[in-house]
Amino acid sequence: MATARTSAKAKSEAASTSDVRKPLYASVGAADLAVEKLLTIPAAYGTEVRRISDRVSQIPAQAARVPVQVSSAVLALPVTVGSQISDLQGRATDLYNSFASRGEKRVAGIRRSPATEEAVKQTRTATSKTRAARTSTRKAASATARAVSDATTPR
């Protein structure tokens, strides 16, 4: 019975850790996607300028159709809004999960990178040296205190 409790507790802790990390992973994933998209802007600039200039020439023909389109869109609005809301909820959940997955992969990649591993190694070395220095300092302070005490104690 203790094994079942221990297993259930481990699963519960793993689930709560996963729940805590998911927003972090989602934000990392969103930032990673934003950087990826920003890097494509220079290449897409020329294509978008040509596309926009083509659309400008079509504006007069589209303007003539606007009154009919607006009236039919207004009539269909209640149905359209309802379906869009339910669709957006599902898409938001999917997008959030996608960002979390992307962020988790990015964080895992960063953790495995040689630079990160070297930084961790150097941090551990520095921590070890700091602890050793702290111990040496404490011992020296104790020895100094004993020496002062011995020196000031009358014999």
Image (spheres, helix red, strand yellow):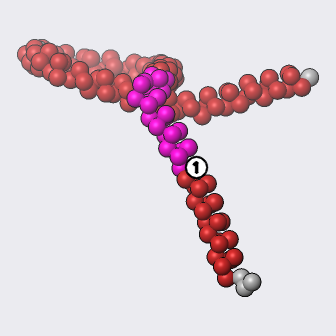
Q: Nearer the viewer, residue 88 or 16?
A: 16
Q: Position of residue 118 (x, y in %)?
A: 44, 31
Q: Dot 1 lies on which element? A: helix
| Quadrant of residue 139 within the rendered picture | bottom right
Q: Is residue 42 above or below residue 149?
A: above
Q: Nearer the viewer, residue 137 or 77?
A: 137
Q: Nearer the viewer, residue 67 or 143?
A: 143
Q: Is residue 8 above or below residue 121?
A: above
Q: Is residue 123 within the magenta segment?
A: yes
Q: Give the left or right position of residue 33, taking residue 123 as reference.
A: left
Is any part of residue 86 visible from this angle?
no
Count the numbered circles shown.
Answer: 1
Q: Residue at x 75, y 27 (%)?
A: 10
Q: Position of residue 137 (x, y in %)?
A: 58, 59
Q: Is residue 154 above or below residue 63?
A: below
The residue carrying mark 1 is 131
Q: Residues within 10 Å of mark 1 (few under 14, many from 20)?
A: few
Q: Give the left or right position of residue 1, taking residue 145 as reference.
A: right
State whether the magenta stretch is mostly helix, strand or loop. Answer: helix
Q: Position of residue 131 (x, y in %)?
A: 58, 49
Q: Residue at x 17, y 18 (%)?
A: 43
Q: Is residue 112 within the magenta segment?
A: yes
- Inspect the image, locate mark 1, and give the three-letter code of the amino acid beneath it: Arg
| Quadrant of residue 35 within the rendered picture | top left
Which quadrant, please, contains the N terminus?
Answer: top right
Is any part of residue 54 visible from this angle?
yes
The magenta-colored residue range is 108-131
Q: Is residue 134 above or below residue 37?
A: below
Farthest residue, direction right: 1
Which quadrant, please, contains the C terminus?
Answer: bottom right
Q: Residue at x 38, y 20 (%)?
A: 75
